Image: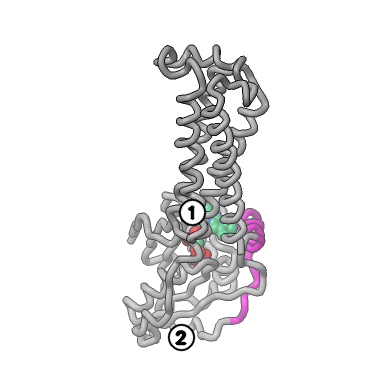
């Protein structure tokens, strides 16, 4: 849903900017003196630009440049956005930057004016919406299937415990369980964790270092000789459902390893230390994995 909304807004912005640029360029080409657009009085400001003697004696070159840089380009982005292709989103983002650069030249050569400022804001909005749409696109195209991991639940000595909102941590947990043929269990909560509202709700728990109530597990933690906890980082700390798990099962775990997933390129050793404190046990291993939009960027192992 949020992908669709942000894509519609991005498409509207590209269309709006593209139509405006084509209208402006046609007017400049029809009347290169600039009178049609009431811009003839602005022509002297262009004379500070390089090659102004050849390019800026009238609006012919400006019209062609506007048509290419902000007109046709935005229509190309709209075409790919309508076709639901990823490159449409990237182009939308890029053309937001080009519009801002274009306006920056105007900021330097023209006196302060409302139109340049408003179009700079449009360019910025286009960039922001392009980035948001790109993030949501990657999120909905993230692929994971439990069926790809047939080797899990075959060694009842080791249990992989995980919590995951978007599925990134889930994939890492399944990979680990499959590698060790270990049992696996997901921590679930009745709190809101999905979508944008869920993100902010989780952030609230993370900020306050609150544990989040979790459903009871269908595995007996005490039966396992080793527990591997796979947790995302929330607000530089332990994800709230995992914090609750550590508090609830602190007396039941004999041997523990952690896998921490996060967006930032930090190892979060302090978070592993905090988990040790909560569980009252020293970890055997810590793997710190930086994941961005579902793709593993770096992995560090601490034994
Ligand atoms: C509420 C919230 C706060 C987050 N805070 C951080 C953070 O401080 N540092 C970081 O690197 N990643 C942070 N992240 C990103 C997650 O740790 C990262 O995307 C993780 O891979 C998510 O795994 P999941 O999608 O399986 O839940 C945060 C995510 C959420 C939802």
- In the picture, the quarter occupied by the N terminus is bottom right
Provide the residue span drawn in magenta.
197-216
The picture quadrant where one finds residue 261 is bottom left
**Residue placed under numbered mark 2 in the picture:** 223
Q: Residue at x 40, y 86 (%)?
A: 153
- Where does the image place residue 81, in percent across and percent down from the top left? 50, 55
- Dot 1 alpha-carbon crowd within 10 angstroms: few under 14, some 14 to 19, many 20 or more: some
Q: Secondary structure at mark 1?
A: helix
Q: CA distance from mark 1 to mark 2?
A: 58 Å
Q: In this orientation, does residue 270 appear? A: no
Q: Is residue 191 above or below residue 55?
A: below
Which of the pair 132/271 is nearer the observer?
A: 132
Q: Is residue 166 above or below residue 122?
A: below
**Residue placed under numbered mark 1 in the picture:** 79
- Where does the image place residue 21, in percent across and percent down from the top left? 55, 36
Q: Which one is in front in this view, the residue at disc 1 or the one at disc 2?
A: 1
Answer whether residue 202 is magenta in the image: yes
- In the picture, the quarter occupied by the C terminus is bottom left
Q: In this orientation, does residue 238 appear? A: yes
Q: Earlier in the sequence, mark 1 or mark 2?
A: 1
- Where does the image place residue 92, in percent across and percent down from the top left? 50, 47
Q: Residue at x 64, y 20 (%)?
A: 112
- Where does the image place residue 6, in percent across and percent down from the top left? 59, 55
Question: Total number of numbered labels?
Answer: 2
Q: Is residue 153 above or below residue 35?
A: below
Q: Is mark 1 within 8 Å of ligand 1?
A: no
Q: Residue at x 49, y 61 (%)?
A: 84
Q: Secondary structure at mark 2?
A: helix
């Amino acid at each position: 849903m949020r992908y669709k909304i942000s894509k519609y807004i991005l498409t509207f912005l590209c269309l709006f900017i593209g139509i405006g640029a084509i209208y402006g360029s046609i007017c400049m080409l029809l009347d290169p003196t600039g009178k049609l657009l009431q811009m003839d009085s602005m022509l002297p400001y262009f004379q500070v630009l390089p090659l102004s003697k050849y390019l800026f004696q009238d609006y012919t070159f400006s019209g062609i440049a506007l048509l290419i840089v902000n007109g046709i380009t935005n229509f190309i982005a709209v075409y790919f956005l309508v076709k639901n292709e990823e490159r449409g989103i990237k182009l939308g983002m890029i053309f937001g930057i080009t519009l801002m650069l274009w306006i920056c030249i105007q900021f330097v050569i023209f006196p302060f004016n409302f139109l340049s400022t408003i179009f700079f804001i449009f360019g910025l909005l286009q960039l922001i919406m392009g980035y948001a749409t790109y993030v949501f696109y990657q999120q909905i195209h993230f692929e994971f299937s439990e069926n790809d991991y047939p080797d899990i639940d075959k060694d009842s000595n080791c249990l992989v415990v995980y919590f995951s909102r978007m599925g990134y941590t889930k994939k890492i947990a399944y990979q680990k369980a499959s590698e060790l043929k270990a049992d696996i269990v997901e921590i679930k909560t009745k709190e809101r964790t999905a979508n944008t509202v869920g993100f902010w709700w989780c952030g609230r728990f993370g900020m306050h270092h609150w544990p989040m109530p979790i459903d009871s597990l269908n595995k007996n933690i005490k039966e396992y000789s080793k527990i591997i906890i796979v947790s995302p980082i929330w607000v530089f700390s332990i994800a709230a459902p995992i914090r609750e798990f550590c508090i609830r099962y602190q007396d039941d775990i004999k041997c523990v390893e952690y896998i921490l997933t996060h967006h930032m390129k930090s190892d979060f050793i302090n978070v592993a230390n905090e988990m040790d404190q909560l569980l009252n046990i020293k970890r055997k291993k810590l793997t710190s994995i930086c994941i961005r939009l579902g793709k593993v960027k770096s992995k560090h192992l601490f034994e």
